[in-house]
Image (cartoon, rainbow, N blue to C red):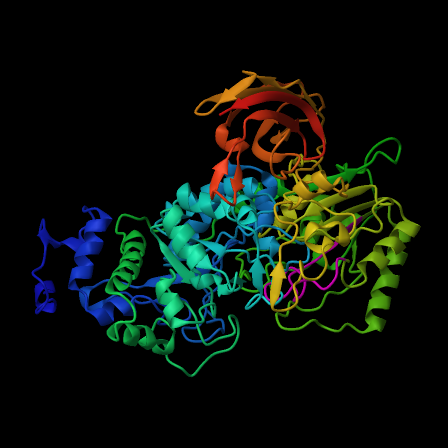
Amino acid sequence: MIQTILSGKSKPIIVGGVLAYLNDNLPIEERVKDALSRMTLEEKTRLSYADGRFSTPGCARLGIPGLMYSDGPHGVRAEICWNSWDYAGWTNDSCTAFPALTCLASTWNPVLSKSYGVAIGEEALFRNKSVLLGPGVNIYRTPLNGRNFEYLGEDPYLAARMCVPYIQGVQENGVAACVKHYALNNQELWRNHIDVQVSDRALYEIYLPAFKAAVMEGKTWTIMGAYNKVRGTHAAHNKLLNNDILKGEWGFDGCVVTDWGAAHDTYEAAMYGLDLELGTYTNGLTSNSDLGYNDYYLGDAYLRMIKDGKIPMEVVEEKAARVLRLIFRTSMNRNKGFGAMANENHEETAYRIATEGIVLLKNESRFDKKPLLPIQKGAYKRILVVGDNAIRNLMMGGGSSELKPKKVITPLDALKEEFGDCITFSQGYVAGRPMFDRADVIPQSVIDSLYSAAIEEAKQADLVIFLGGLNKNYQQDCEGDDRKTFELPFEQNRLIKGILDVNQKMVLVLTSGNAVDMPWIEKVPSLIQSWYLGSIGGKALADVLIGEINPSGKLPFSYPVRLEDCPAHFYGEISYPGDSIRQEYKEDILVGYRWYDTKKIKPLFPFGYGLSYTEFQYGKPVVSATELKAGESLEVKVTVKNTGKVAGKEIVQLYIGDEKCSVLRPVKELKDFYKVELQPGEEQEVAFTVERDDLTFFDDERHEWIAEPGRFKIYIGRSSEDIEGTATFMYCD
């Protein structure tokens, strides 16, 4: 039958009775080469553009299936109609909603990242998805970026270490991870055209390391190009990003895919590294077109340019080979399993990530010399829960990361389960519906009524738990635009101050993917930074509040006192958000804590910060040698002891600073970390290895990584600001 279908083509290569490109026992490169030899020009080009909103074709004549895609990275999105952005209305496409990636980053736990990837990959596989569009690894540059909640924080090392196991876990299922958005997609405002100007040094030191690790360590099978321009050319078909760096320097053998609407030119798309065009002639999210898929840039126009001799055949062959390689790894991989629907194991993974990611920011002993947290059962007869986020399904909204979870446990539900009739609820403020394209206008009469009711309830309460922050409404933590202000929305600051005026016993829980302004910070005794915690988020939060789980998360970004303290905002509008056409990253390499350290600006809460219900004591760091030579390594050891009364986890952070350098360098940079779990009284030695690569900076002129001989300083700390010990050594080239 197959030989009949292939009549007129080259003689089939048959191994063990199976055509080579169909033979799973042969190396993929042999299968790709064989399939290419049988395909017409039209079939090769047809591989590179969509045939549905979330699908691209294979080659039906040869029995090669296409690819199915799903939005991520926090869960497998509900089914979308074949040729529109409407939901298909299936009843069997619910998922586990996993915590947002800011929460994952806050765990500082690569083992949990691997579990996350395995679980979400299983659900994608069960739903017959070939490519999961995640994780996102863009750097947190400004707290106004609407999509920061999908990313892994401000530090390139932390983002790299957390994304690699996620990718590996997803791809163990025969589902491709798609790392996004490559590159410099650090804001949503004007994202479709803003032209980012950045130095080579900042590009290589800050904005590319997580992508590089995803490719060279995680072996990701796909990369998604960003919407924005970089130095005048759109990122999705950018010669520097795709040809020179991604496929050149890093040797990426997978596919570069577009975000929807990110392609803009046929010649550039063909020549500058784009392999799969997923969506064009839409605004990227909502609008549809009467034009056929063959009208995409890599459709008929691409084929005509090839036939006219404007695009070399080697470009066509390489592009088709990359798509075939992806197909053989995923949809045509007969060795993969069956996957699994949302289940208890996945919920347990989501729960563990949520509990380890929650960050305790403040817990002062103001009342009877005791902190409010953890909340002791029986200690309070009347606990008032206030806030829209106590009852809100936070998996709704946010843009493409919106999910249809099989289960949702809200914080109010979980607290009622723990405290029963002791819990009363007052909404306090209203946030409106999770709309993507507009913000709801709430009548002032409604706002005032809810405010007054909450204040009256707070007067009668023994304890107030305020559950506020942001949500995934448009112009908050949401795709498509940035936040318009650093302040909390929906008059929450007024409400928080009003409650504190009548009841000082407040535990304030902020849900967000971003830092927010805190004008009430001095008056609040206990403060938790929560995130979008997913399906089991309410129980995870409640278990931290009552002490069933000891909080161990640490901030993956710095919390500024004022928005003007942020490096992206310090240099005025040309730095952020740009002039609507062009933008200059004037802070260069000084992003996040690198800026606060170097400029001696004190943050409200530093990068890597987070408290516990126990105490940890650090020993003095010991270095195995006073001198490090190229090609060698040295070891740094430090003891950590739990001196408190409950078990807990501590994240030991290692930073390195160059004491004297020919170029500007930050005071210190994160180079390693380790999360250690200790019982009360238990002590453990933590060991780190330092090598030449940990000392380097990127030289713009020589286009290489340089480590200059001289003295380097090791910092061991609880956070970027709270340093417990230091040591020095000399580097000799």
Q: In this rendering, is residue 206 above or below 332?
A: above
* Magenta residues, start to end: 465-486
Answer with the quarter of the image where residue 12 lies.
Answer: bottom left
Which residue shows up at 67% across the image and 41% down it?
Answer: 593
Q: Is residue 125 left or right of residue 206?
A: left
Q: Main secondary structure of the magenta part?
A: loop
Q: Quadrant of the N terminus?
A: bottom left
* Residue 331 visible (yes or no): no
Frontmost residue, 514 versus 140: 140
Q: Quadrant of residue 315?
A: bottom left
Question: Is any part of residue 347 visible from this angle?
Answer: yes
Let me know if residue 470 is in the magenta part.
yes
Q: Nearer the viewer, residue 335 or 634?
A: 634
Quadrant in the rendering for residue 487: bottom right
Q: Position of residue 681 (x, y in %)?
A: 67, 18
Count numbered badges in the picture.
0
Residue 609 lies within the magenta run = no
Q: Is residue 494 left or right of residue 117?
A: right
- Residue 20: x %, y % from top left: 15, 53
